[in-house]
């Protein structure tokens, strides 16, 4: 047990040698804050506001400087070359579009001519008494005829005796008729 007490005595001797200076400093600081606390608070708020105001001004100034530096780096010849390249690319795309539009117009014209020919042939057929419009397509091949035969087959029914549209096959519940004939 004697070892524990000796250890405590050593710690007390090694502790803070000037506790009066620390307590005096703490007391002075608390007195200062008590006397000037509101001034300190308003000063801190003012500094925060001033900092944010200056920060926005500095960012604007930096942005303006950066733009001026970028404008000074531009060379008129480079800008002109870039614009000419863009114009050439636009012209090339416009030429492609014009070619596609011309090709589409030719196809539409050919279709219109083909349709008018068919109408003339139908009219001539009608004049000869062969019928006004052809029921068969001239370009029909055997593959489409085979598909038509498959389509003409009737579909197999699951149950021949049931059709949901007939109505007599359900539960048989029918609500009572409403009327004004209540007893009384």
Image: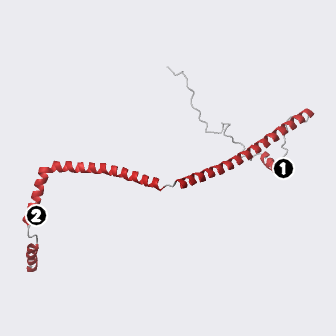
Q: Which residue sits at x=20%, y=48%? A: 42
Label disc, if present, on residue 22 of the rendered structure:
2
The residue under label 1 is 141
- Tell me where residue 37 appears, x and y as whole percent: 15, 50
Q: Secondary structure at mark 1?
A: loop
Q: Is residue 178 above or below residue 82?
A: above
Q: Residue 181 location in percent, x, y?
A: 54, 21
Horizontally, residue 63 falls left or right of residue 10, namely right
Image location of residue 30, percent across then percent down: 12, 55
Q: Mark 1, residues whose alpha carbon is within 10 Å: few (<14), some, or many (≥20)?
A: few
Numbered tag placed on residue 52 in the rendering: none
In the picture as drawn, the residue positioned furthest to the right comes out as 128
Q: Earlier in the sequence, mark 1 or mark 2?
A: 2
> Total number of numbered labels?
2
Q: Could you say whether the residue bearing mark 2 is in a helix, strand or loop?
A: helix
Q: Residues within 10 Å of mark 2 (few under 14, many from 20)?
A: few
Closer to the camera, 72 or 48? 72
**In whole angstroms, how far apart are the C-alphas of marks 1 and 2?**
110 Å
Q: Is residue 77 visible?
A: yes
Which of these two is toward me, 74 or 8? 74
Is residue 158 visible in this depiction of the protein?
no
Q: Residue at image x 26%, y 50%?
A: 48
Relative depth, front residue between 43 and 175:
43
The residue drawn where x is 8% and y is 74% is 13
In percent of width and height, residue 81 lies at 57, 54
Left or right, 6 with reference to 100? left
Q: Residue at x 9, y 76 (%)?
A: 10
Select label 1 or label 2 by which is in front.
2
Residue 31: image quadrant is bottom left
Q: Is residue 82 above or below residue 138?
A: below
């Amino acid at each position: 047990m004697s070892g524990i007490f000796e250890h405590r005595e050593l710690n007390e001797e090694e502790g803070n040698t000037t506790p009066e200076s620390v307590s005096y400093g703490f007391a002075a600081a608390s007195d200062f804050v008590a006397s000037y606390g509101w001034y300190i608070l308003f000063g801190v708020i003012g500094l925060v506001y001033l900092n944010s105001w200056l920060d926005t001004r500095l960012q604007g100034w930096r942005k303006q400087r950066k733009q001026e530096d970028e404008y000074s780096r531009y060379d008129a010849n480079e800008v002109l070359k870039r614009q000419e390249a863009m114009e050439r690319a636009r012209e090339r795309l416009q030429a492609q579009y014009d070619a596609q539009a011309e090709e589409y117009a030719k196809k539409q014209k050919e279709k219109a001519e083909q349709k008018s020919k068919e109408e003339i042939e139908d009219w001539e057929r009608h004049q000869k008494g062969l019928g006004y419009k052809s029921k068969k397509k001239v370009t029909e091949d055997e593959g489409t005829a085979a598909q038509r035969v498959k389509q003409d087959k009737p579909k197999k029914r699951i149950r021949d005796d049931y059709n949901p549209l007939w109505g007599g096959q359900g539960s048989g519940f029918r609500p009572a008729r409403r009327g004004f004939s209540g007893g009384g």
